[in-house]
Image (cartoon, rainbow, N blue to C red):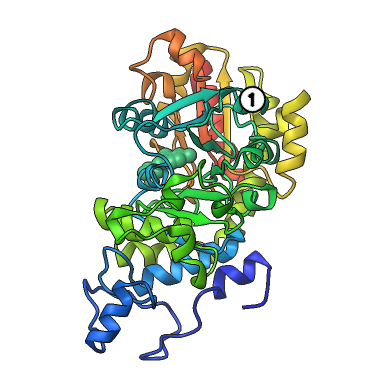
Amino acid sequence: MTSKNPETLALHAGWRRDSATNAVAVPIYQTTSFQFDSTEHAANLFGLRELGNIYTRIMNPTQDAFEQRIAALEGGVAALALASGQAASAFSVQNLARAGDNIVSSTDLYGGTWNLFANTLKDQGIETRFVDPTDPEAFRRATDDKTRAYYAETLPNPKLIPFPIAEVAAIGRSFGIPLIMDNTAAPLLVRPFDHGAAVVMYSATKYIGGHGTSIGGVVIDGGNFDWEAYPVRQPLLNQPDPSYHGAVWSQAVKPLGPIAYILKMRVTLLRDLGAAISPFNSFLFLQGVETLALRMRAHSENALAVAKFLAGRKDVSRVIHPSQHTGAAAARTAKYLPKGMGGLCGFELAGGSDAGRKFIDALKMFYHVANIGDARSLAIHPASTTHSQLSAEEQAATGVTPGYVRLSVGIEHIDDILADLSQALDAAAA
Ligand code: PLP
């Protein structure tokens, strides 16, 4: 596929037809195992002298088509699909850092990622140093000899301020440290590799799937990071791996292309920890990817219209959407989001927590769920749900105020979206 246009890649990259049946749609290869042609063939597959299917925990043809398509769309070299976005975040870090090491991460993270870093990875001996994402230099200041990766989200909610990808990626590269970007909220709108990131991950559960049917994740290798050049900084890719006959990943994988990072993740972390995606979910994500460009455009247009509508309401004291930023955040929006600002929009009700609850209860079309990225419009009042266990101070620190409502604006007709919001706002003010 020579096209670089996302609309075309989304339908054609990584697949032409089924080699066995000529089927045009990618079949669901619902099988655990694959017959070896001979003992030599089997030995070559296990020895990584040849890439091919062995066992669906490690790889599967339906999964492979999804991985190739998403890698092409992202401008990366290869991808690994996993059972969830959480598995993708965990593996993206564990592939580089082990006990005694640290990573530097933006504070503005999805709560599940925060917990993973602050508690679970900490218990495994991997320290996370959280820094303010608005100051790229904070990443440099938090770096020491044991820092193995930087981590951030492209468009974190609730603040929806684009992360300075190029600025932080450049600081990381000066040390031999790759930037891992969670691009869940902005697929196709931002391509972090174009700005110097080395690894991109997604919760495919959100916009990639797009229809609220499946949990999944994916990690994409940019193939743009010279692991071999940093033998001391990146020991897990440059020292012999006892779990794979002493393979030195930056060397062993060279003949197969610049895929050391992602291949190691597949044949060690996925092999051992087993967070495999099912062939059926890979199929559903492929269906989602086919319309991703159309949907991201529609989500972006609708959310922008919603932001403008909310900004005109007297009962709304603040609208949180990239179009509303000023100063440095507005400059970052112009730099990173020229193709669209995504489907998320937050707002603050002047009536506080009570008004927030009333608003949610009055919605007729929007679903009240703790998810984002569905084709349908979704809403949640974090202070009474996702963030209710936090103190008022902790809520404020994460950007959640009592009257804050988060919308994931869907692709319904904009008139119907605005009508539902309007009647629910009226009900909340009554
Ligand atoms: N990253 C972001 C930005 C998310 O919003 C989520 C889920 O809400 C995740 C990661 C985790 O993904 P999953 O729910 O697929 O495990």
Q: In this orientation, which residue lies closer to the viewer: 186 or 268?
A: 268
Q: Position of residue 222 (x, y in %)?
A: 57, 56
Q: Single out the residue that lies furthest toward the bottom.
A: 21
Q: Is residue 244 left or right of residue 393?
A: left
**Residue 177, can we see it?**
yes
User: What amino acid does circle 1 point to?
Assistant: Val
Q: Is residue 152 left or right of residue 191?
A: left
Q: Position of residue 18 (x, y in %)?
A: 41, 85
Q: Position of residue 316 (x, y in %)?
A: 61, 19
* Element type where label 1 sits in the image: strand
Identity of the residue drawn at 66% across and 36% down: 171
Q: In this orientation, which residue lies closer to the viewer: 410 or 75?
A: 75
Identity of the residue drawn at 29% across and 53% down: 275
* Residue beneath disc 1: 319
Q: Quadrant of residue 127?
A: top left
In the image, residue 256 sits, relative to residue 323, either above or below, namely below
Q: In this orientation, which residue lies closer to the viewer: 40 or 189?
A: 40
Figure label count: 1
**Residue 277, can we see it?**
no
In the image, residue 256 sits, relative to residue 330, either above or below, namely below
Disc 1 under 8 Å from ligand 1? The reply is no
Q: Position of residue 398 (x, y in %)?
A: 49, 20
Q: In this orientation, which residue lies closer to the viewer: 60 or 226?
A: 226
